[in-house]
Image (spheres, rainbow, N blue to C red):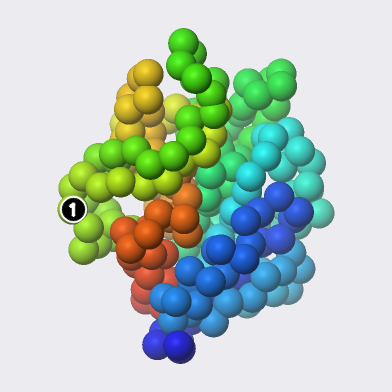
Amino acid sequence: MKLLDVLIVVVDYGLGNLKSVRKALEYAGADVRISREPEEIEKADGLILPGVGAFSEGMEKNKPFRKALYEFIESGKPLLGICLGMQMLAEWSEEGGHHEGLGVIPGGVIRFQNVKTPHMGWNLVKLKDHPLFKGLKREDYFYFVHSYYLKTNEEFSIATCSYGTTFDAAVSKENVMGTQFHPEKSGKSGLRVIKNFAEMCRDGS
């Protein structure tokens, strides 16, 4: 159903959970395009950077359209990174050695210690007041699959979760957001996050 006059591009670089993300966006009423072409990215009202896999591989695969990503971020339009997509927004990662990230969100990606990895399944997330979480309770359950997490400054953290340690489950800096959990796999609450993002894209905020 098309309820929102908004075009959201899901970036396809070979490591994303594209079908589930697309279905969630379509359910939210957005017009969805899966692409990695700079021209398509430029036209979008919003951008989703998904991802499942290794940090270094993700950074290698985003090289061809990295300039377009930075230009999109500079435009002020909303961007949402999911899982690996969120981690790549960081300055660096220790996964498989030291690797530089996109450097959009301050901080680095580190591995869980003294707990079974990957952290997989549903877990309680404490949500801060942010447009991405409009209409949700301050605590809700979301679905995770990851062995590393982004550690940033408190001012950029908009949600936290506990698994051996308290970690940042979602981040935000100006028009750039990220969720470590998979909203497209997190039932009604996750779909609400996707819908909220689509509405932010429509409103240009």
Quadrant in the picture for residue 74: bottom right
Height in image: 17 above or below 168?
below
Q: Is mark 1 on a helix, strand or loop?
A: loop
Q: Which amino acid does label 1 sit on?
A: Lys
Quadrant placement of the N terminus: bottom left
Image location of residue 52, percent across then percent down: 63, 45
Q: Which of 131 and 95 is in front in this view?
A: 95
Image location of residue 165, percent across then percent down: 36, 20
Q: Residue at x 54, y 34 (%)?
A: 146
Quadrant in the picture for residue 21: bottom right
Q: Residue at x 48, y 30 (%)?
A: 119
Q: Which of 139 and 57 is in front in this view?
A: 139
Image location of residue 156, percent across then percent down: 36, 39
Residue matched to label 1: 137
Q: Nearer the viewer, residue 63 or 190?
A: 190
* Disc 1: CA contacts within 10 A as few (<14), some (14-19) or many (>=20): some
Height in image: 94 above or below 89?
above
Q: Residue at x 71, y 69 (%)?
A: 35
Quadrant in the picture for residue 10: bottom right
- The answer to whether 27 appears left or right of 138 in the picture is right
Image location of residue 44, percent across then percent down: 58, 74
What is the tally of numbered marks visible in this picture? Answer: 1
Q: In the rendered image, is residue 176 in sight?
A: no
Quadrant placement of the C terminus: bottom left
- Name the residue at the top extreme: 114
Q: In the rendered image, is residue 169 in sight?
A: yes
- The answer to whether 115 appears left or right of 35 in the picture is left
Q: Which residue is drawn at 18% across and 53% down?
A: 137
Height in image: 151 above or below 182?
above
